[in-house]
Image (cartoon, coloured by chain):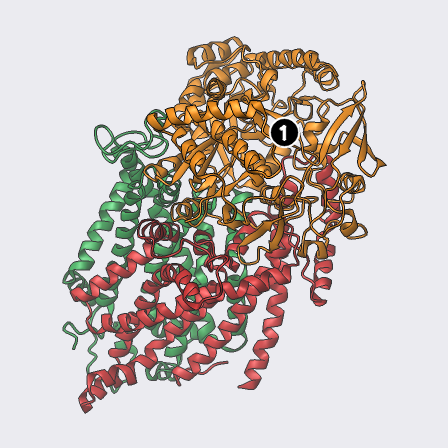
Amino acid sequence: MRCTNWQSTGLRDGEEGVAVEADDLLLRLRDANARVSRRDVLRMAALSGMAIAAREAGGPLGRLNAVWAAGPVRGGVWRMAIAGNPTAYPITIPGKLVDILVDKTIYSTLVHYELRNGAIGVVPDLAESWSANSALTEYTFRLRKGVKWHDGQPCTAEDVKFTLDALLNPKVEAGLAGVVSSVAQTQVVDPFTVKFVLKYPYASLPVMLGYNIAIVPKHLLEGQDLNQPVQFLQHPIGTGPFKFKTFARDGYLEVEANKDYYGGAPLLDGIVFKVVPDSNARLAQLRAGEIDFTVIDPPQVAGLQGASEIEVRRAPQVNYYFFAINHGSARFGDVRVRQALSYAIDKDAIVRNILKGDGRVATGPISPLLGGYYNSRVPQYPYDLERAQALLSEAGWRKGADGVLVNGKGERFTVLFNGPKGYPVMEQVMTYAQQQYQRLGMAVTLDIVDWPVHLQKYHDRQYDLLMEWWITPPDPDLYDHYYSGSPDNWWGYKNPQLDTLLVRARSEPDPQARVALYQQVQEMIAKDVPVVYLYYPPELQAVNKRTHGLPVMGYRDALTWMTKVWVDHP
Amino acid sequence: MKSQAAAGTPASPAAPALSRPFWRRVAWRRFRANPAAVAALLFLLVVCAVAALGPQIVPSGPNAVDIMNPNAPPGGTHLLGTDENGRDVLSRLIAGARTSMIVGLIAMVIAIGIGAGVGSAGGYLGGLPDSVLMRFTDGMMAIPYFFLVLIVVAVFGSSLANIVLVIGVTSWMVVARIVRGEVLRCRDLDFVLAARALGGTPARLLWRHVVPQTVPAIIVAATFGVANAILLESALSYLGLGIQPPQASWGNMLSNAQAYLWQNPLLPMYPGALILLTVLAYNFLGDGLRDALDPRYRDSHQ
Amino acid sequence: MSAYIVRRALQAVVLLFIVSIVTFGLIHTAPGGPALLQNPDLSRVQIERFRAQLGLNDPLPLQYLRWLRGVVRGDFGRSYNTVEPVLGLVAGRLPNTLILTGIGLCLSLLAAIPLGVASATRRNTAFDRIVAGFTFLGVSTPVFWSGIVLIVVCSVKLKILPAGGMYTIGAAYSLADRVRHLLMPVFVLAVANLAEVTRYTRSAMIDALGEEYVRTAHAKGVPPSAVIFRHALRNALVPVITIIGVYLPRAVSGAAITETVFSWPGMGQLAVQSAATRDYPVVLAATLAVALVVVCSSLIADLAYGYFDPRIRLG
């Protein structure tokens, strides 16, 4: 049933999804006001049948049996490791990722994401429903009623407008402004209805509004300096399932359960976000039982073998790793050269030997997690060093006396290959790639630099090849990075035909037509190789088994479902 | 030493005018009698030889990546196994010997040179020059070290020469203070005052009388200078600076291995053991030198 | 004496000024702007706008004066990474580091001085060599290794000590709990410093024991222990004082890796993190804090020379 869908996304712990569903049902049944439908009863029977079978067979489904037996328990604190000091302020997110993680528990977004049948979709959160006009230039969102801020005040459309205005205010250093840059104006229609007027037709607005766009309280932030709201920062107030409790002065930030949460009080008493900068130390703390959750790298999976109380989960995330190509460099203008770059890399070997099987070879910028949008039938570039050499030859590059490729004009094929320091897996991939490209005759110099310098060289195009990754909202829109006129087209890629397609696709109101357009987009990109696509990695999570109910999603999304999470009590 | 004896007070009968070669033979004999020092010297000579011959004697290319065979255990073609990229560990250790020895020795020489110069000048001259030099030293100690290295590496690149320079130029402050302390202690010793009474430029006095008194401390500082330089390079690699791969150094082999701690716990042992042995060897060598050169040495003390 | 101190104080102020100017210049030479702006989701337009807003496009002297004006008022600006006031941030972290490195240094000295003295009196014996071997093992093992190995052994395998942090979160205040959290990082720091202090002590003791007055004391029939402790040690302490004087500033910013591995929220970690992410206001404040400590410890060391070795005249 479900299992096949999970397998198609390359996951192993598909059974986890079934366990989550069972928890779900149990929670609803135990809820005082639950009404049990016939479907629920049938589902329950099916699940318990599977549980009995699993108990016989052993394995992860055996846990399902334990869940059925013990059931969710209230109380307890869940501890998670983060790499830096968080600031619970979603407007400027100065610390970027760690802030976003903490904000997921304290604040709410209009919509959030759910993983169903192997694809990520949008579900309501603060917004109950929404609709758009036929041109996709105006969206109306209807908000849930009865939502209260942690200080008791009601949450209304005014707060939504205030948040969006703040994000789009040029004077505010809003890290997420790009996500909602399609919005021209936010209008309050009535206390529970918001209207977004867009600058251009845009199909992806609902998805974007779920991408970390947390709503902040107008009554506390109006009139404050939004770049440094000193008082608000002392005690941030949101509408989320958890309330801010203590500041991160001594290396952790604590939140406690919000009993009045509109989605039902959380089962946990609280969550502690512990700041543990060293990745080996995070793993050690997990194994010592001092934290319950951390994200790990492929080389660290080996360290968890034999740790029976820890579970390694491969959570799907919308992410792809690639070698960016600087299209300003004349050498890369010939598509054959770019194709050669892709043929020379054995991506299967990378997934097998470096990622230890945790990953899937990438075919393009759109991930299989986007369900119907994903086109698996595009041209691919399986490992073929001879083909790569032949393509380079056709493009006019022959090996000179010293083994380095030279073209007709006598220019040598030198490559400055940039990458960020501190990511062991990326360094391994780059080291391998350097060797492969050197076998083709390119003179490759690795330029592994620290993060700010890496990003600066990326933005200023001081590279020939550069390794990066891209985590995106679960939406197929590629305009920002692939459209030739976009200021965020970091590679200087220009393809007029692709441009037309991209604009059409993002403003297409008919979902099926849109799917067809994106299929074409992927086909075109695969043929033209704007960058060398490498792999889609899962997010590797190491979780203490006392944790139950945490959906198997990337932690940016899993943290929006914390009301369902409960822990065993010792 | 001879200088002390010759320029010493006339009323010192136990100081015959002996020749330099005599003292050299005495020193060598003393050194030879010290087993640890001799062993250390031999070890270091071997390491230097390996470092010099490096490319000739490696079993396989130290930078030859083999993605199919990462973290292999010792055996077969790879005597000590492979690292996280499938490169032969033994070859990298040999290639790294050259890098690490250069880093250790040259950075130390730079640090000792600057430090001893600044420290002895300040300690001896006193007054305003001392204040200026010492405040300059204080200032250099205050500048955030990591930041300085980061800038040098980002602006000038992390070549071997730059790393050596930057380690040397940021390690001299300790030496300066140590040397200054010693100079302060010796400046007013009897024989120095006597020598000053006899006349002579401050530089000559400094060089012939005061500096020899500081030699033991300088030798210790030099020992630590090498150790610090090699380890600092390792710490820089851990922080993202330092010698960049694929070039091998014991320091960056050590720091790279810690990301693979769980997969291959033995990997750091090899460079780590070599660093320890080298640092120990410099230490025993330093002790041996100091004992051999010390005129007041008594063979059986207490 | 007091004139000397006043002079040193004036020199200190000048030094702090110069250090702040040099650091300021260095910061802005470093390629790559603040990490705040290095967010890959920001568009080029936004980055430019934020730069202008943070005042990063103004000429350097103007930016420096702006910062100086704030400092005079007690406002060191706000951190780019956490938006909190820098002074509070640094003031909160400094005690954490001082506790860690202070105790580490004391332990180091407590062990190193006796070891150094013992090695000097048993020169070139097996004892001497073994002590050298062990102390150098401590020095040659970088903290990012010894720290993690200790954590794995004591926290993961044996489960007797906590794996990091300053105290157990959620538990009531308990001195025992704080001590348990201190044990491993302090041990690692002490072991790293042990070798240097031991070696310098040994070297200085050897020198002192060879002096005329020591032989005179022997000849007079003074018992050996008294010779060592009352006569030789005082003079041998000069290089030791120097080392301590150098360690104090290192104590503030030098424990960065230890603090990172043991998740200890201290100054060292802050200095490295803020440099890596180009959090300019924090880098400046952290540098000044270190400069202040350097100046004070330098003064204390110089005064201590005079106390321990009367032959040393200062100035």
In depth, the one of B244 and C188 nearer the eye is C188
Q: Is residue B178 visible?
A: no
Residue B54: where, in percent of width, then height?
A: 29, 37
Above or below for B124 versus C32? below
Q: Which chain is red?
A: C
Is residue B71 shown left or right of residue A28? Answer: left
Circle 1 Cα neighbour tier, 10 Å, few/some/many (<14 / 14–19 / ≥20): many
Q: Colour of chain B?
A: green
In depth, the one of B213 and A165 nearer the eye is A165
Above or below for B254 versus C247? above
Residue A159: where, in percent of width, then height?
A: 78, 42
Above or below for A391 versus B16? above
Residue B240: where, in percent of width, then height?
A: 47, 44
In depth, the one of A481 and A61 nearer the eye is A61
Q: Which chain is orange?
A: A
Is residue C15 shown left or right of residue C309? Answer: right
Q: Quadrant of residue C304?
A: bottom left
In depth, the one of B56 and C240 nearer the eye is C240
Helix, strand or loop at disc 1?
Answer: loop
Badge 1 amino acid: Pro
Q: Chain of mark 1?
A: A
Q: Which residue is mark 1?
A: A473
Residue A311: where, in percent of width, then height?
A: 41, 36
Q: Residue furthest bottom?
A: C220
Q: Is residue C17 visible?
A: yes
Above or below for C229 versus A429? below
Is residue B69 shown left or right of residue A259? Answer: left
